């Protein structure tokens, strides 16, 4: 499923929450952090956190989960991530994992299942358009999320 631009009615544009997420790790595994930028109209909120021993993929998932869980009520969301892992999981892998009881095609447990299930739960409350952005290319929200992910590591 490709992420096609969605045509929101003009009246709904102020109801959309734009989110940028990123995860970082120093060593993989190693200390990791996640960063989130939430933008709703003229309001902006930044969140970050970290874990002492984790992986980059876990921090990418954690960023998306924390972002969606920070929203009040059910929202229309435009979520930007530079993680192919998250995008592939959302668009390609997760539907089949769920059908197979959270097993891969080779009948092995899904890696990071706890976080994929938490993300699945967080997704269920919102209408989300997922967009992949290339990291470290000067996209302001993505650069800010990257800064916050690294801040999450620094504050451990």
Image: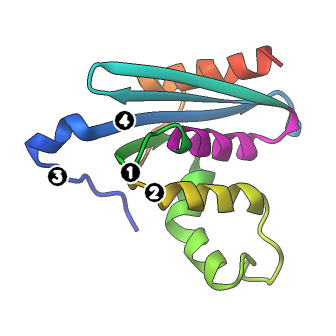
Disc 1 element: loop
- Label placed on residue 54: none
Q: Is residue 56 magenta?
A: yes
Q: Nearer the viewer, residue 82 or 58?
A: 58
- What separation in Å lies between label 3 and label 4 (alpha carbons)? 15 Å
Disc 4 element: strand
- What separation in Å lies between label 1 and label 2 (alpha carbons)? 5 Å
- What separation in Å lies between label 4 and label 1 (alpha carbons)? 14 Å
- Label placed on residue 7: 3
Q: Quadrant of residue 42?
A: top left
Q: Which residue is mark 2?
A: 125
User: Of tags 1 and 3, which is closer to the observer?
Assistant: 1
- What separation in Å lies between label 2 and label 4 (alpha carbons)? 16 Å
Q: Residue furthest left?
A: 10
Quadrant location of the C terminus?
A: top right
Q: Which residue is mark 1?
A: 74
Q: Are marks 1 and 2 in contact (CB under 8 Å)?
A: yes
């Amino acid at each position: 499923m490709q992420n096609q631009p969605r045509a929101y009615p003009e009246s709904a544009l102020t109801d959309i929450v734009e989110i940028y997420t990123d995860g970082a790790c120093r060593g993989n595994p190693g200390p990791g952090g996640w960063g989130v930028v939430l933008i709703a109209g003229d309001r902006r909120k930044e969140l970050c956190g970290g874990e002492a021993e984790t992986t980059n993929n876990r921090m990418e998932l954690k960023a998306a989960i924390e972002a969606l869980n920070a929203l009040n009520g059910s929202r229309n969301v435009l979520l930007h991530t530079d993680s192919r892992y998250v995008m592939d999981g959302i668009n390609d892998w997760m539907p089949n994992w769920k059908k197979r009881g959270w097993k891969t095609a080779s009948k092995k447990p899904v890696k990071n299942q706890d976080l994929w299930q938490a993300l699945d739960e967080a997704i269920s409350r919102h209408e989300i358009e997922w967009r992949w952005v290339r990291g470290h290319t000067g996209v302001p929200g993505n650069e800010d999320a990257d800064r916050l992910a690294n801040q999450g590591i620094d504050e451990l």
